[in-house]
Amino acid sequence: MISTSQQIAFINLFPLSSIILLVALIGAIAIARQ
């Protein structure tokens, strides 16, 4: 059984990774436009 603290850490990881991907994508577009 998954503990509550593990579930919280798992849920918190998803927004963080999606933000990193979004920033990387915006950075790649900015570099490509130059």
Image (spheres, rainbow, N blue to C red):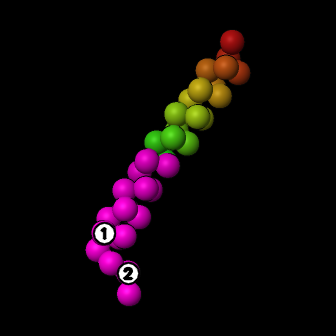
> Which of the two residues, 27 or 13, is positioned nearer the viewer here?
13
- Quadrant for the N terminus, please: bottom left
Q: Magenta part of the protein: which range?
A: 1-17
- Quadrant for the C terminus, please: top right
Where residue 30 appears, x then y in whole percent?
61, 20
Dot 1 falls on a residue whose secondary structure is: helix
Residue 13 part of the magenta segment? yes
> Which of the two residues, 7 or 32, is positioned nearer the viewer here?
7
> Which of the two residues, 30 or 9, is positioned nearer the viewer here?
9
Query: In the rendering, which numbered label is found on residue 22?
Result: none
The total number of labels drawn is 2
Above-or-below relation of 5 to 29? below
Dot 2 falls on a residue whose secondary structure is: loop
Q: Main secondary structure of the magenta part?
A: helix
Horizontally, residue 29 falls left or right of residue 23, namely: right
| Dots 1, 2 in contact, CB < 8 A | no
Residue on which the image places disc 2: 2
Where residue 15 appears, x then y in whole percent?
41, 51
Horizontally, residue 25 falls left or right of residue 7, namely: right
Three-letter code for the amino acid on which mark 1 is drawn = Ser
Where residue 33 appears, x then y in whole percent?
67, 17
Q: Residue furthest left?
A: 4
Disc 1 versus disc 2: distance between alpha carbons? 8 Å
Above-or-below relation of 10 to 18? below
Residue on which the image places disc 1: 5
Three-letter code for the amino acid on which mark 2 is drawn = Ile
Residue that appears at 30% across and 69% down:
5
Residue 5 part of the magenta segment? yes
Residue that appears at 58% across and 34% down:
24
